[in-house]
Amino acid sequence: MANQLHTLLDLWHEQKNARNWVLGTIYKTIGPCYRKAGAIMLFDDMGRHYGLLSGGCLEADIQRHAQRVMNSGEPKTLCYDGSDEDDFAFQLGIGCGGTVHILLQPLNADNDFLQLEQLRAQLRDRRHCHYLQKIPAAGESAAEISTAEAPDRPARAQLIERTDGQWLQTPIAPVPHILLMGAGADAQPMAQLFRTQGWQVSLCDPRPANGRAAYFPDCTGYRCHPDDLSTQLDLRQVDAAVVMNHNLELDAAALRALYLQPLEYLGLLGPVSRRDRVLEQAGLTLEQLNASLATPLRAPVGLNLGGEVPESIALSTCAELHAALHGADAGSLSPADTMKSDKKTAVQA
């Protein structure tokens, strides 16, 4: 979670007045780059930095420039060109070949700390917004926050032109809230993986032996029947859910509770034959359920990674859920010809 925006803002908030800070933001990239526009990083006057603007290869040099920004109180832009033999990025042998433009700005009372307190409040209140930073033309630092509806995924940062100059507009979304319907032993590695992504995790399981806080750190538990969950949790605030009670009646009740909620992902543990039995007991058809969701029901849940133990199922589910939340297809990033070559190598071996 160390690179998640809400974690960075919480860390900065705790030491806001005790340290001098600089905010680093990627505002433009050209070609292949490790991070994209909108990525942020924080630097303090103790020489420490938090977050990443590259794969870790540029951060030491960016820190050096950040210290100069602290000393001068003036913002600064940097450009690292991985395709230019004379550029620092090329000399490091990074190899990505892309160009990244970075804005460094001091954080102080004069510029209202670039609205980071307000941005943190938006995230804590689970409100979508746009964070705007002015690209300085005359040494000024400025930031604004504008309210926004939940955007279609994936939402990307972009440079916009206004009458007062060029601004980077970054869509900001609340931390995804994931609900596990069922908190048995196999839910533990799943909850743990979800938490490493920085997601908010809630659990619902009425059985006394399940969902113990010691086994699900930093998760919120609801020890109630799925039929009663809506009286304790606003299900409209849930982005995704995985149903894994290992009990037909409880799984059916979970689907009934989640039916008509605007979920971006709903997974049901178990094979297709079990899915049909759960739907029948819930009094729902697959068509009814899918019509109420942003994406179709995933059952069996997860990507085909070849594993069957709880840790493997957790990994495949987390990967599929991550892709759904980011509007990705969960396919391999390798070119098709590379995949064919790998397959031939495997056969020959």
Image (cartoon, rainbow, N blue to C red):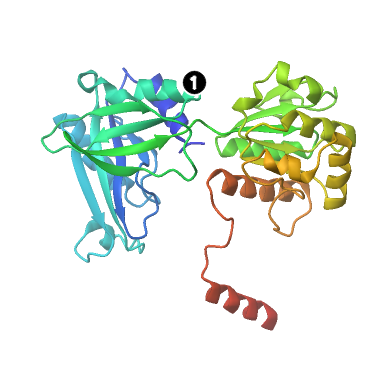
Query: Residue drawn at (28%, 61%), measured in percent from left and top?
Result: 82
Q: Quadrant of residue 97?
A: bottom left
Q: Quadrant of residue 291?
A: top right
| Most foreground residue, 124 or 165 | 165
Q: Relative to 327, is 234 on the left or the right?
A: right
Residue designated by label 1: 125
Q: Quadrant of the C terminus?
A: bottom right
| Figure check: 224 above or below 75 | above
Tally of marks: 1
Q: Relative to 226, is 47 on the left or the right?
A: left
Query: Residue drawn at (72%, 31%), measured in percent from left and top?
Result: 258
Residue flagged by tag 1: what amino acid is it? Asp
Q: Position of residue 289 (x, y in %)?
A: 73, 40
Query: Residue drawn at (26%, 20%), measured in percent from left and top?
Result: 112
Q: Can residue 218 be seen from the camera position used here?
A: no
Q: Relative to 39, is 84 on the left or the right?
A: left
How busy is the neighbourhood of tag 1: few (under 14 within 10 Å), some, or many (20 plus)? few
Q: Position of residue 196 (x, y in %)?
A: 58, 38
Query: Residue drawn at (34%, 25%), measured in percent from left and top?
Result: 116
Q: Position of residue 36 (x, y in %)?
A: 37, 49
| Figure check: 347 above or below 127 | below
| Most foreground residue, 68 or 266 | 266
| Figure check: 221 above or below 190 | above
For numbered disc 1, what is the local secondary structure?
Answer: loop
